[in-house]
Image (tube, rainbow, N blue to C red):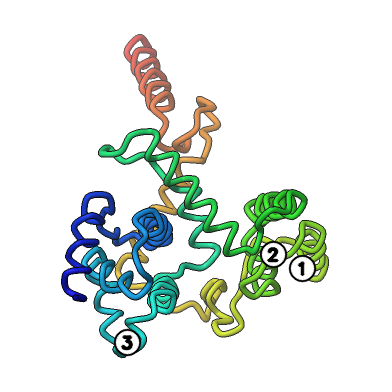
Amino acid sequence: MLADRVKRYGSALKQVISPMSEDPVEIPAFFETSENVCHAFEVPDDLKPKLLVPFLCKKARSFTARLSVVQLDDHEYVTDFILNQFKLTSRQYKARFDQAEKRFDETFIMFAARLRNNFRYYLRSREVKDDFERLCELIISDKLRSCLPQGPLNYVLAAEAGSWHSPDKVDELADFYVANHASGAANVSVSPRSPGKNRKPFVPQGQFRKWQGAGAHQNGGQGRSQRADARKCFICNKIGHIARYCVERRLTQTTVNSMNSTEGDTA
């Protein structure tokens, strides 16, 4: 009977297949592993979907609820359907590979396997398989894009439209962008939908300047104080005061007055 067959194969698969991860990058590896295990145990095709459902993550099981009974009996259709639901973009696969770090609960062998899977899925999304020259072109193209300022980078990505260009095409697009923009524009990207995003607010000057509030007097006082600190005394040649408030001037005047007083007493 069907129930007996499912139970017999299910108990065997339970010993070797781990539950599906919630990480979209690891889901293709889950299906590859499960397919190899089913092949080794000679599991019939009509039982594969029924046997794999208990191993699916919660989100994947919710996706299968949309399928009809006929679709659920087709193992290849179920696999492709779930993979498409969790599919990442090429840039997301590349970012996960570049930013990957070893987890505290995994060995270096497991970490290396995860890196290998991430890079394989990235190459698959870029349609790079067994072509060494195409692989070199992709790596150089990625490096070029990582070195571009934001303006040329946005221009190149818009031209690629989800695909990828060869290094020759990337540098051609970048140079074209720089050559057709004003000096410094290569580092600034202005969205056509928000033209004022990168502009500085207009500040009225002179008699048209708006009142800035009570703080304006304080700022003005600070400006006057800074200007006063820059003045130089012509008596002592020191900076920070004027001759009227010079200490040496007062000492000199006091000495002169004392001498005059002494001369008057003597006379």
Judging by the rendered image, the residue that carries numbered circle 1 is 177
**Vertical placement of residue 232 versus 13, above or below:** above
- At x 50%, y 28%, the residue is 238
Q: Residues within 10 Å of mark 3 (few under 14, many from 20)?
A: some
- Locate the C terminus by quadrant: top left
Residue 123 at x, y = what percent? 60, 57
Quadrant including the N terminus: bottom left
Question: What residue is drawn where x is 21% and y is 67%?
Answer: 54
Q: Which mark is residue 67?
A: 3
Element carrying mark 2:
helix
Q: Residue at x 30, y 79 (%)?
A: 63
Give the mark count: 3
Q: Is residue 75 visible?
A: yes
Side of 148 where 264 appears, left or right: left
Give the amino acid at mark 2.
Pro
Type of the residue with mark 1: Tyr
3 or 1: tag closer to the N-terminus? 3
Q: x, y percentage for residue 55?
A: 24, 63
Q: Which of 171 and 96 lies nearest the eye of the viewer?
A: 96
Distance between mark 1 and mark 2 Cα atoms: 6 Å
Alpha carbon distance from label 3 to label 2 = 44 Å
Question: In the picture, residue 45 is in which quadrant?
Answer: bottom left
Q: Earlier in the sequence, mark 3 or mark 2?
A: 3
Amino acid type for the residue under numbered disc 3: Leu
